[in-house]
Amino acid sequence: MARAVQKRTLKTRARLIGAAEEIIAEGGFEALRVEEVVLRAGTAKGTFFVHFKDKDALMDLIIGARINSLLDVLSTKPTPISVEELVRALMPLCDFMTCERYVFDVILRHSGAAAVEEIGPIAATFGRQIDVFEGWLSEAPFRRDIPAGLLAEGVQAFIIQAMAAQFCALNNAQLIHDRLEPYLRAWLTPET
């Protein structure tokens, strides 16, 4: 039988996460260092590693929670009825996911696309994105020759492509919005 988690353990974990959130608020995600987290949380470095496998595991938790918050908002929005509305609705998610190169890199590493063995918070948000997009696309006036789930997966793939181009010196002159709109127009409203 599994032992109940002690209140002290939960408080320590919360202090570590709170300290990390403070550091991120002050200097961004890339500024986060394990040494600074434990110093602010008033714990030993070994205590950090009892709670998190490494810095990326903490980032997975924090970034995943922020993506989930954005998906909470998206899931309450009305169904976009045009590609322009869809792209506008997606921009807060894209803006957060590309707020720093480091954030985008962590997201890609933990998305499940890199053969991650366990499903963490970020990977779970990728499944949730598909659910939100599929809900919209099943009601939206877009193509009907393929299932809404496949349309949703395509939208997600084009979002990732548009975001990745932002970090490529050869392609970063175009804004995500401007790159994403033609992708989605071609995918969701192909000319017959």
Image (cartoon, grey):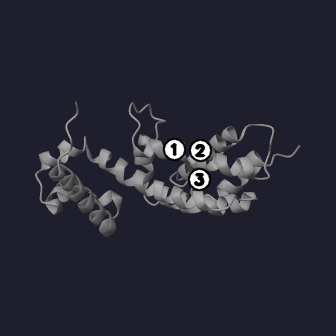
Q: Nearer the viewer, residue 149 or 117?
A: 149
Query: Which label belongs to residue 115?
Result: none
Q: Quadrant of residue 144?
A: top right
Q: What residue type is disc 2 on?
A: Ile
Indicate whether 54 appears above or below 182. above
Whole-number angstrom distance, CA of label 2 to CA of label 1? 7 Å
Tell which tag, 2 or 3, sits nearer the viewer. 2
Image position of 3 (left or right of 132): left
Residue lying farthest bottom? Answer: 26
Q: Residue at x 10, y 51 (%)?
A: 44
Q: Residue beneath label 1, please? A: 126
Q: Residue beneath label 3, please? A: 171
Q: Nearer the viewer, residue 57 or 178?
A: 57
User: Can residue 51 be seen by looking at this rendering?
Assistant: yes
Residue lying farthest right? Answer: 192
Q: Quadrant of residue 23?
A: bottom left
Residue 167: x, y in percent?
50, 53
User: Can residue 173 be seen by looking at this rendering?
Assistant: no
Query: Which label belongs to residue 130?
Result: 2
Give the quadrant of the C terminus: top right
Q: Earlier in the sequence, mark 2 or mark 3?
A: 2
Mark 2 burial class by Cα count in 10 Å: few <14, some 14-19, many 20+? many
Mark 1 burial class by Cα count in 10 Å: few <14, some 14-19, many 20+? many
Give the quadrant of the N terminus: top left
Q: Residue at x 51, y 44 (%)?
A: 126
SS at mark 3? Answer: loop
